[in-house]
Amino acid sequence: QVQLVESGGGLVQAGGSLRLSCAASGSIFRVNAMGWYRQAPGNQRELVAGIARSGNTNYADSVKGRFTISRDNAKNTEYLQMNSLKPEDTAVYYCNADVTHWGGSRLTYWGKGTLVTVSS
């Protein structure tokens, strides 16, 4: 089993910054792609940013130029630096990881989510 634990959410004023972290632990041979998703009330969960093990990244158009995803492979941890936050960024943010286990099986895991609230 693998656990993903997010941290860093909270309340911030519009224009402010937050940094989210997500650490993976458990029976891990290798963490492959990782990502951040978010879900606002009444909306579907959407991809915010993704990062391959190689470091290649992709972003939702709505966050390009404001958010930066990064990772530390040695720590099985990913980060999301969020700058110039807007009220419409308010959501529960979930981390996601594609994990290869010892023995070769491969599964996708989700964190429990961390709430980001941006006040206007």
Image (spheres, grey):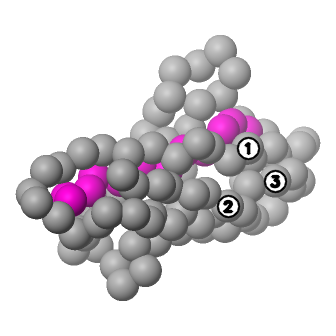
Relative to 6, residue 37 above or below: above
**Decide: marks 2, 1 in contact (CB < 8 A)?**
no
Distance of label 3 from label 1 (alpha carbons): 6 Å
Would residue 26 be seen by someone viewing this image from the given angle?
yes
Q: Which residue is mark 3?
A: 10
Give the camera-side residue of 99 and 86: 99
- Secondary structure beneath label 2: strand
Indicate the position of residue 100 as horizontal and vertical percent values: 19, 59
Is 95 within the magenta? yes
Indicate the position of residue 30 as horizontal and vertical percent values: 23, 68
- The answer to whether residue 10 is left or right of residue 113 is right
What's the residue at 24%, 45% (across, down)?
Answer: 107
Relative to 98, residue 55 above or below: below
Q: Which residue is mark 2?
A: 7
Which kind of residue does numbered mark 1 sit on? Leu
Is 37 within the magenta? no
Q: Which mark is residue 115?
A: 1
Which kind of residue does numbered mark 3 sit on? Gly
Give the camera-side residue of 57 and 34: 34
**Decide: marks 3, 1 in contact (CB < 8 A)?**
yes
